[in-house]
Amino acid sequence: MGKYCVNCGNKLHRGSSFCTNCGTAVLSDPEPASAPPVSQVQHVEEYQSVEEYQSVEQYQPVDEFPLVQEHRYDDQEANMPGDIGTESRQNKSKKSGSKISIVLALLFFFQSVIVLLFGWPGYFFGVEKDVKFHESEIVDGIYQSQGITVDFQNNPDIRSFGIAKTEKANEEEGTVSDTYEFEFETVPQESITMSIPAPKDFTLGADEMLYLDVGVSVTGDAGEVFMVYDFIKAEVSNEMLTTEFVPAHYSNPVNTVYTSGIPIDKRTHADKFRFQAAYTVKTGKDSTGGHFKLIFDNVRTKTSVSDEQVSELLSRMEQVYNQMDSLGFDMSARTSWPMEIYTKKFAKDEKTNIEMSGQYVMKPWGINYSHININRNLFENYWPDGIISVFGHEFTHFVYNCKVPLGKQLKWLNEGMATYFEDYFGGTPEYSGRFPEIFEGIYPASDSGRAGYARPSVINYWVENNDSIAGGDSLTPKSKMSGLIELLSSGGLVKVDRWHEWITACLKDPSKYAVDFYTKVVLCDESVWGDKGGLLPYRMYQVIASPKEELGTWDKIKSLFGKDTEMNTDAELNRKFAEMKLSADEVASEEGQDFSVKVPGYGARIVALSMTEREQKGLKEDDTLSISAGGGETLVLLKIRSKKVETQQGANLFLPEFSKTLKDKYCYLVLLVNITNKAKDISFTVACGEGLPLDEIIGTYDINYDTASPVKITYYVAKDGNSLVFSSSDAFIDIDGIKRPATLSYDPLKGRAYGKNTYPWENAGKVHEVTVHYKLYFTRENGTITMTGVGSQYINGDPAGSWSYDEKKID
């Protein structure tokens, strides 16, 4: 038996001291790839920490490319070019005799939801690279050269095309033919038949199946190049490997591939149509429940995954199906089972270092033909939790597809749910690289799959608050989690903001829970996925406030947030997370020190408070700093010492003995949350002194000194939102016979209320305009609150007297 690398599974030459593929040293008695060493298993188990996420290439979700066309679930109503449906495919197969007529519209490459996750280094036949094509002429409708025959007789207008042999047959990778790449200027509109001589003495075993693996190169939003592929069943006829298909079905993705709502051509080679093809032999095993068939490339993967492991995976896949069913998800749209789960190595894009780990592929002729593809590396270095995580993600897309056609879904909600379920079923999500994105808003600014990958935290928050797992689903009369699917059911022909209105109607308005949600995000609470990659508060403070020379490079920042974080400049870091450098002179001034940040709708920003040792000397150790929201917004203050965190919440916050706590190694973060659906500036002021919150001065005030006057005047302080409402027992009565209270602005840091009150007043048969200007000050001494100040009256703009206040709060 041959020896294989314990790291990558590459076959080792006799006497090798290292692997020629990955460079791993060869052990004295190397184990086969099917039995990973203990060190590998331990490495996977250590996967949870932020640091480990950086040392291992994990799978990461990237954009989905959904349809704008509705997919029919009824197989016989599949509306494909040439009216090709289930029956026509069967009839054509009979006419072809020994040939299998598989009219696979490779347009599914672009008429499909391709759910991509990044991950491990890999191989795919025809890694994207420069290809030198041989211009080939077609004679009497037939091309025959380089060991390949292509029948174009149904396409008389096709005179020539480009062809190149890009890879040799490689049984180690499961290919039994060379890999060819085709290039067309004019795309064949009718079926072609591709035949390649079978290997010498080639036969298929009882459990083996012959396929043509076909792939089209696509470019993603990040510039990554990846292959979208499918597997067409083939047959051996007259010692030839033979398949029939229609290239035109997958040649034109224009107006079917969407990114952020903009129709674009995502095909890597837009000027000419290109695809790759190679024959492979595969084996498969059905689950006992009958819902899934796990299919492997025959040689290498078959020898690296045991029958017991395959049975374990299929059993867990059936558990996913059963759990989805028990949670209330309706999967009856699919009437033909099993669903195929293919394994295939994916090519890593060398420029972006991006590689996908899974795809859900929806074919044009109905949901019964959808299937899932999973990166083969997860099987060769057997990682069942990783496999089931990817499977759970992709299967969630299928569940959505059962409810709503692909082109009518809310993409971010689709991906958010899929990412949530990859953790629910497999327990190995990658979230750290997406953590900063959630601060852009509970609802993303625009609908995209990329936005959804950052929001499983929102999904988890909804699930916990609606008790969906336990069974009490407030969204619909149905049981358990079916309500989350109902969020998609209002139809997809409306604007994204209408989707958000629908979600708000089903759930609560985000303004009701945004502060609680983001507080938990910053605290890395497990209810909002913070335990799956979010930065603990003290680490967040380090990232924001560390001097550049200590922080090091931008790579260091990304190592903290995750290697796939979308922040890539210092300016972007500062936009999401800001630092307020406190000045002793400014915070001690009458106005205090102001700070303002623009916060997205239903989003949040984090501000780190810092103060140099030199500035700290300008404060007394027992000085209290107060933080007051400029617009009365609810602020959240985090007082942090290592992993210990204390929180305050409100429009007015207090930092007792601020300078002393800094010397004791405490640090502070201020969380600003926008509870409106539009971006706005949120400001706050930091000043010395405790100030007086508005809630504490509300009450009744009476004269603060002895007087012989028989007239007693009582004053009343109330509030209206963030404003102070001031009235008295002897207030003027206006022309309508109503006492008009004054609504004043209130600054809690200074304990100051100011403003004016204007109303009409009738006297001696004439109507006059009365205006009173107020300047009131509230102080606290020995537990008693006192109001002082001045009121100045004007009648028709002319001074009409003034008076002073010196009142104490009596209740």
Image (cartoon, helix red, strand yellow):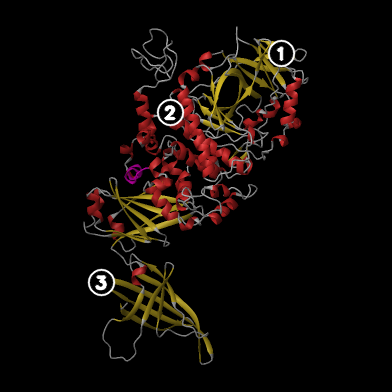
Q: Is residue 343 left or right of residue 562?
A: right
* Vertical comparison of 510 with 347: above or below: below
Q: Which amino acid does label 1 sit on?
A: Tyr
Q: Which of 398 and 646 is in front in this view?
A: 398
Q: What residue type is labelled 3?
A: Gly
- The stretch in magenta equals 535-544
Observer-nearest residue: 268 or 524? 524
Circle 1 Cα neighbour tier, 10 Å, few/some/many (<14 / 14–19 / ≥20): many
10 Å crowding of disc 2: few (<14), some (14-19), many (20+): some
Report helix, strand or loop for mark 2: loop
What residue would you read off at disc 2? 383
Count of number-bearing discs: 3
Magenta-colored stretch includes residue 541: yes
Q: Can residue 128 be seen in this view?
A: no
Rounded to the nearest angstrom, the CA distance separating label 2 from label 1 is: 45 Å
Q: Which mark is residue 693?
A: none
Q: Earlier in the sequence, mark 1 or mark 3?
A: 1
Q: Does the magenta stretch include residue 734?
A: no
Q: Quadrant of residue 214?
A: top right
Q: Is residue 199 above or below residue 286?
A: above
Q: In which quarter of the image is the N terminus?
A: top left
Regarding mark 1 in the picture, which secondary structure is present there?
strand
Residue behind mark 1: 143
**Which callout, 2 or 3, points at the residue further toward the start of the chain?**
2
Query: Do tag 2 and tag 3 residues touch (Cβ < 8 Å)?
Result: no
Examine the residues drawn in magenta and state their main secondary structure.
Answer: helix
Tag shown at residue 783: 3
Looking at the rendered structure, the secondary structure element under dot 3 is loop
Residue 543 shows in this picture: yes
What is the CA distance from the residue labelled 1 to the residue labelled 3?
Answer: 98 Å
